[in-house]
Amino acid sequence: MSAVDACMQVNLPKIRFPRRFSKALVPFFALGVGAILVLWPAHTLRSDNFVFYFPKERHVVRLEIIDGANYVPVLDVLSAFGKFTSFEQKRNSAVVVFGGSELRFKKGDKKVKVGKSSWNLLRPVEVSNGQWMVPTDFLSSILPEVIHQRVTYELGEKRAFIGNVKPVTFTADLTPVPNGVRLILQFTSPVTIRTASQNGKWVVFLGDEPFEAPAHALRFQNPYLSALRFDDQDGVPKLLLTPGAEGLNFYPSQSGRSEFVAEVAKPAPKLAQLPAAGPTPSTAPPATLPPPAVPPSLPVVVLDPGHGGGDPGAHSHDGLTEKDVVAAWGERVRAALVATNKYRVVVTRTGDADPGFDERAGIANDERPVAFISLHAGNLGDKLPQIAVYTYLPSSLTAASKNTSTTITHSGASDERWALLPWNQLQLAHVEPSRKLARELERQFSSVQGLTASGEDVEAPVRMLRNIDAPAVAVEIGSFAPDVDARPLTNGALQDQIAGAIVRALDAFLGGRG
């Protein structure tokens, strides 16, 4: 089990972004001898893709994280530039002929041969789900030699610019106005902007121009606008604006093609209309209605399937890995929650990726969830199946100081002490709600026939929980150990029963208001 440190929150009256800034894939999870296909839905505002920007079009390929590094499928990359002549593969090697160049790859080798020349990559070539994968430094080293075009790519980014493409950059200013805040975007080239609301956020679509994105999303403490994130992972550049509260209005006005201005403000109070004394001339301009407020979104529940990518987690005797089991289990929980029509569900990882601790916490805190549940599998003893629930307790706290409610006020951001809590102590403001959620989960798990529940929540320094700004728990299923056959944990009926118990626990925790 694991947890995180993430970036510090920022609260500045005026913010300028740096120049550089980040549907669903169908992954296959090996679950025992029989493979179970799991449709893993991508978070609609985040995905694992790589975008190639050409002068008049763009091309999206799958991005996969292997051992902490970004990889792309080499055949899909080459197909973005034309048809390859031939492709032959053996057990541990492959040969691709493209545009008159012969590329030779060997699994696990950093060296790639192009004709008679050899090139060294930063990471070895890998094979994933039957596809030959190359690390993304392939794009800046070998690819230009093969396609005979300029490739502008910065290591770690999720986009590359081909040929003479000159990406648009922008700055953003945030300034207060009465009852709201004003956002001013300045672009280096003209753009065509369209706005919409989606999942409780405002979306600013940035037209068809290629964009050089800032390095990070901005999260800041503001009652009107709490986050701004650039996203182009579906090939459509856009900005995602998260309001600081429900019911706020968004007033966009593009003053020029190189500038965009929008205000986020409270709705104007309704004024009583006096009855007219008689007929009036129709010379007054027609009344206009203000833009609609963002519709209230459903309460958000964040699911965090542990591990993934190059971090498989625990292993069982029969070859199962923790990352695959919790991914399939998490999908059951997600589907059960969505089926109630009471919740919007966000997952912290899509497919076989392994987002860092900071990224998982950032995804969760951006969504302002009513609950955060991290899913794990581990060694819980001899009995199978078992389940345990954990809440966060800092490792530095002694038994005498476990009652954090005596030293920390849980009233939210309006309390001065809470506002000054460091990022790595955010969970301390939610200790009691987290314990309440854990007790409800334990109560519901104990009603699942054949499942052994611990009967009480356990306080532990679970690092994944400490940076979560919401009621948060970790749920661990077991036993899952090198000397145990964990196949029963992949039973769909059992996973459905556990998912149903989680739904009932959340309903009870929220008092039926889900």
Image (cartoon, rainbow, N blue to C red):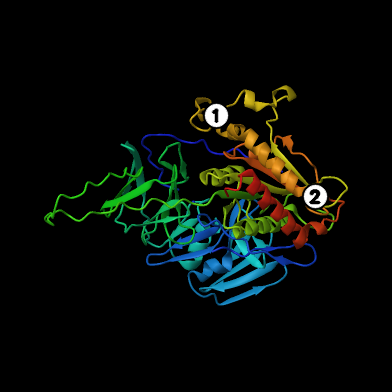
Residue 16 placement (x, y as % from top left)? 37, 40
Who is closer to the viewer here, 387 or 60? 387
Q: Earlier in the sequence, mark 2 or mark 1?
A: 1
Please, what is the three-letter code of the amino acid marked with disc 1? Leu
Dot 1, crowdedness within 10 Å: few (<14), some or many (≥20)?
Answer: some
Residue 167 placement (x, y as % from top left)? 38, 55
Q: Quadrant of residue 371?
A: top right
Q: Is residue 415 positioned above or below 245 on the image? A: above
Who is closer to the viewer here, 293 or 306? 293
User: In the rendered image, is residue 306 in sight?
Assistant: no
Residue 421's label in the rendered image is 1
Residue 478's label in the rendered image is 2
Who is closer to the viewer here, 57 or 484? 484
Please, what is the three-letter code of the amino acid marked with disc 2? Gly
Q: Residue at x 32, y 49 (%)?
A: 251
Dot 2, crowdedness within 10 Å: few (<14), some or many (≥20)?
Answer: many
Residue 477 placement (x, y as % from top left)? 76, 49
User: In the rendered image, is residue 468 in sight?
Assistant: yes
Give the side of residue 212 with respect to residue 28, left or right. Answer: left
Q: Quadrant of residue 189?
A: bottom left
